[in-house]
Image: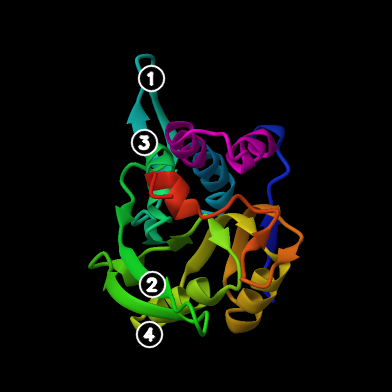
Amino acid sequence: MSKVTRFDHPLVQHKISKIRDKNTTTKSFRELVEEIAMLMVYEATRDLKLEEVEVETPICTTKTKVLAGRSIGIIPILRAGLGMVNGILNLVPNAKVGHIGLYRDPETFQPVEYYCKLPVDATERELYVIDPMLATGGSAIDAISSLKKRGVKHIKFLCLIAAPEGIEALQEAHPDVDIFVASVDERLDGHKYIIPGLGDAGDRLFGTK
């Protein structure tokens, strides 16, 4: 079964409280989502491989460590996942970015893929699928399945807020994909929205509500 990492750091929890607030402006909401994503990827990349290199400091030559091989790939689930991209790129600026477009059918609640564009070397990278919300888990499950069909083997999932139902569904569908989440909320309501949640992350990021 995949591992679930919950972020209880005071800075993360403080910023999560801010994005829950319905009075937080679009500008502040965007900035906070980026900041939380940056704090989360710091921990999510802890197991990246290193290699030893030799550098010359102003004092002498020494051996030190750098990231080994190719860097990571970031795969936001459109559209809300876009809000987390820049925060991650602030820490890993040479990461490549792909996109997966999914929408949820309003009657069946099932995700439908309408777009997928990955880095050409996606199979050689560790890919981080990102989406602010993990509700039913349907979009994340389908996005990860789409990556696996294209030969990707190393995948992690990052989200800000998750429902227990979504975590369980994602773990059952993809037991090899570790999950990183800032807050696990109470439940889903009858419309499959996370309670207490923060509303529609895409609308709040792009001011379309």
Q: Image point 68% across, 56% down: which residue? A: 5
Q: How many marks?
A: 4
Q: Which label lies toward us, 2 or 4?
A: 2
Q: Which residues are magenta?
A: 12-34
Give the dominant element type of the magenta stretch: helix, strand or loop.
helix
Residue 33 among those drawn in magenta? yes
Q: Earlier in the sequence, mark 3 or mark 2?
A: 3
Residue 134 image point, x, y percent: 58, 64
On the image, numbered disc 4 is attached to which residue? 149
Rendered residue at 67%/73% (across/down): 190
Q: Which mark is residue 60?
A: 1
Q: Which residue is mark 2?
A: 102
Give the amino acid type for the residue marked by disc 1 in the picture: Cys
Evaluate if marks 1 and 4 touch, with contact meaning CB atoms under 8 Å apart. Answer: no
Mark 1 and mark 4 lie on one chain; the one further toward the N terminus is 1
Separation of marks 3 and 2 at Cα, in angstroms: 45 Å
Rendered position, 6 above or below 173: above
Type of amino acid at the residue the image marks with label 3: Glu
Q: Residues within 10 Å of mark 1 (few under 14, many from 20)?
A: few
Distance (Cα) linking label 2 and label 4: 16 Å
Q: Are marks 3 and 2 in contact (CB under 8 Å)?
A: no
Residue annotated with mark 3:
54
Residue drawn at x 32%, y 63% is 99
Q: Residue furthest right?
A: 186
- Taking depth in this image into account, of 46 and 103 the one nearest to the observer is 103
